[in-house]
Structures are given as structure tokens and as C-alpha cells.
Amino acid sequence: MDELILTQPDDWHIHLRDGAALTAVAPHSADVFGRVMAMPNLKPPVTTVSAAQAYRQRILGALPPNTSCIPLLSLYLTESTTVAEVEAAAHSGFIVGFKYYPMGATTHSELGVSDLSRCREVLHAMAKSGLPLQVHGEVTDPAVDVFDREAVFIHRQLIPLLESHPDLRVIFEHITTRAAVEFIQGAGAGVAATITPQHLLYNRNALFQGGLRPHHYCLPVLKREEHRQALLHAVASGHPRFFLGTDSAPHSQSTKEASCGCAGIYSAHAALPLYAEAFESVGALSLLEGFASHFGADFYGLPRNQHRIRLIRQSWTVPPHYPFGSETLIPLRANETLAWKVVQI
Ligand code: DOR
Ligand code: ZN
């Protein structure tokens, strides 16, 4: 297969940032995706409908002039989020979920939730309105090994959460382990997961290939090969509750290549080619469209996109860096060749 025509895909998990960084990265996603779900972990985080409205305007301002790409937003859940805010979000028309960051789990999660039981009424309101909870599924307990944080999260938090809120719709974001795959396969129709390109393409050896590789560092961190295989099998099974969310997370070169480097992999410049490579590696290219373009929209209860995009087998070389405000951004696969390319229809 040398050409794929797909319903236009959506990115259900992306960090677009703000200001000059937003201006630098937004066009990469707008060129390909029909909708982008912008994560709210700005500084300060996007916790209210009015802040989200303002952020949405800034995103719209950063998109290319004749784009059809629509930004959707997620609100950052805090222990002060009110039921009234949930109701306002449900009526906003552009906020389609709340993001749960366990406090301290990742970039800008300082204002996240330390005890989810303090959000009981808010979660109840979300279940009632149908707004899903988008979960960063890692425990922050320092006693838990960093590679086990997702698996432990399932038992300590996710199972109890769904027991107390059986009607809450949950998206287990950027899953990385066999345990998470099996959890989704065994869960009800209201529970889904997003999967990033890096977790389909790399195992944790990529962090140490000939030296420390900061541009392969993200959270949740890359895992062992057996977990990558479990993720590949999940997407190659065509299961409708695994769908695309790049978690493309740009940080400047200087903050990545530092003694305490930031977590985040930038993949928006090549998202579809990277996913195509992963699907092709397991002979599942024909299942890419469901994962990239159908299942996410179906889960969020939104219409599938009308436009189509074309992917062709044509090699191209990823630039060594992109401008990023006054700094530079090192993309995934910098200076390397990709086999697939998105072209205009
Ligand atoms: O690697 C990551 N980067 N994981 C996250 O959860 C957050 C993200 C970011 O915002 O940089
Ligand atoms: Zn993320």
C-alpha cells in the first residue's frame, strides 16, 4: 500500500502552549487535524470557562488564516472546581472534558488534585452532563518506581474512581503499559484511552541510546518492549476505545537539554507519518483510519470529520529544529527520514 486516503483525523490530546510558542506550533497541527484538543496545563492553568474562552481565541489567532481546524478545550480540574463551572463548561460548546492531573505528576501539575475524593460532587456533575474526565494516570507516591506509576494508578485510583462514579466517562490518556491496555479491554463503553506515537514506536532503551536522550523523555516515561508490543496489539485489534492523542508537548531546546530537563516530546510536525509507521510495522495500516479519525469523535459524541486527507509513501527528512519564539524546538526524529507524508488531496 503506497497511498492512504483517510477521513481527516483529530488529535484528542495536544499541548499547544501560549504566546510565541503557540504561534510556532499551531500550524503543524492545523495542516492535518480537523480538531485539536488543547490541554489546559498553562501557567496559570485554564480552570474556568472564561479563561478557556480567552485561550480559545488566542489559539484561533495562531491558526493559519484559511484553516478548517477547530480547537476544543479541556478544563484543568482543581480541588476548587465548582459544580456551576462544570455546568457552564457542558454548555460552552467548545469545552469537551476536564483534565485530571494528580498533583505533581507532570509539567505544570502543581495545582492539580491531591485527593480525588474531594471532587466527588464535581465528578457527579460531570457524569450527569456527560463531560468526560481526561486522566493523567500516574500515581505520584515517591515510593513507587517511576516505571510502575501507571499500573499502580489503575489499582489505587482508577478502579475506585469508576466504582464510586460508574456513569463517569473516562479517558485514560497516553497509556503506556500492558496493564492499561487490559484495563481498557475489560472496562465498559464509557472508558477509553489515547495512545501517543512515541509509545507505539519506542521502548525505554530509546532514552539511553548511546547516551542520555532528553528528546525521548516524556511522561509517562517510555516503558519496556513488552508494553510497546501490547500497545501495538491494542491498536492493531481495531478496538474502538483506543484512539489518537499525540501528547505533542513542545519545550525549548534549552529546557530539554538541561541538568533537569523538561518532560515532553514534540511530534505534531509528523504525527500522521509516525502513526502510519507504527501501524505499518504490525501490518495494520488499514486500521489507522478508525484509530485516527473515527473512534475519538465517536467516543466524544461528535460528528466525524467531512474532509479527507491523503498519506503517501514518500520519504522526507525532518528538519533539525523549528523556530520556537526566540528559541528552538527539537522535533521527534530531527534530521531523520520518515517514510510517509501527508499531501493535499
Ligand atoms: O511529557 C509530558 N509533557 N507529559 C505530560 O503529561 C505533560 C507534557 C507537557 O505539558 O509538557
Ligand atoms: Zn499531555
Image (spheres, grey):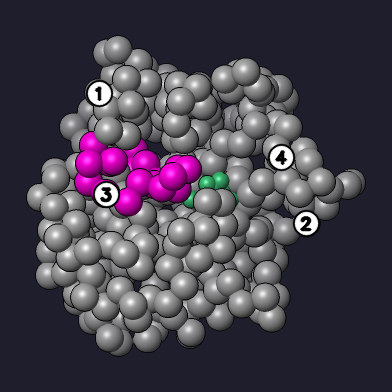
Mark in the foreground, 2 or 3: 3
Disc 1 marks which amino acid? Answer: Ser
Q: Is residue 165 left or right of residue 288?
A: left
Mark in the foreground, 3 or 4: 3
What is the crowding at mark 1: few (fewer than 14 residues within 10 Å), some, or many (at least 20)?
some
Residue 272 visible in the current orientation: no
Mark in the foreground, 1 or 3: 3
Q: Which of marks 1 and 3 is nearer the N terminus?
A: 3
Q: Earlier in the sequence, mark 3 or mark 4?
A: 3
Q: Residue sitting at 57 percent across and 57 percent down? A: 106
Residue 313 is covered by the magenta coloring: no
Q: How far apart in space, not on screen, are marks 2 and 3 (Cα)?
A: 40 Å
Label drawn at residue 48: 3
Disc 4 marks which amino acid? Answer: Lys
Q: Residue sitting at 70 percent across and 66 percent down? A: 224
Q: Residue sitting at 36 percent across and 62 percent down? A: 78
Q: Where is residue 306 in the image (x, y as percent from the top left)?
A: 18, 32
Q: Which of marks 1 and 2 is nearer the N terminus?
A: 1
What is the crowding at mark 2: few (fewer than 14 residues within 10 Å), some, or many (at least 20)?
some
Return the residue nearer the eye: 206 or 101.
101
What is the crowding at mark 3: few (fewer than 14 residues within 10 Å), some, or many (at least 20)?
some
Mark in the foreground, 1 or 4: 4
Disc 2 marks which amino acid? Answer: Asn
Q: Is residue 128 left or right of residue 337?
A: left
Which residue of the protein is positioned furthest toward the top in this rendering?
65
Secondary element at image label 1: loop
The quadrant of the image that shows the C terminus is top left
Q: How far apart in space, not on screen, are marks 3 and 4 (Cα)?
A: 30 Å
Residue underneath mark 4: 256
Specify start and end residues of the magenta stretch as a single range. 36-53
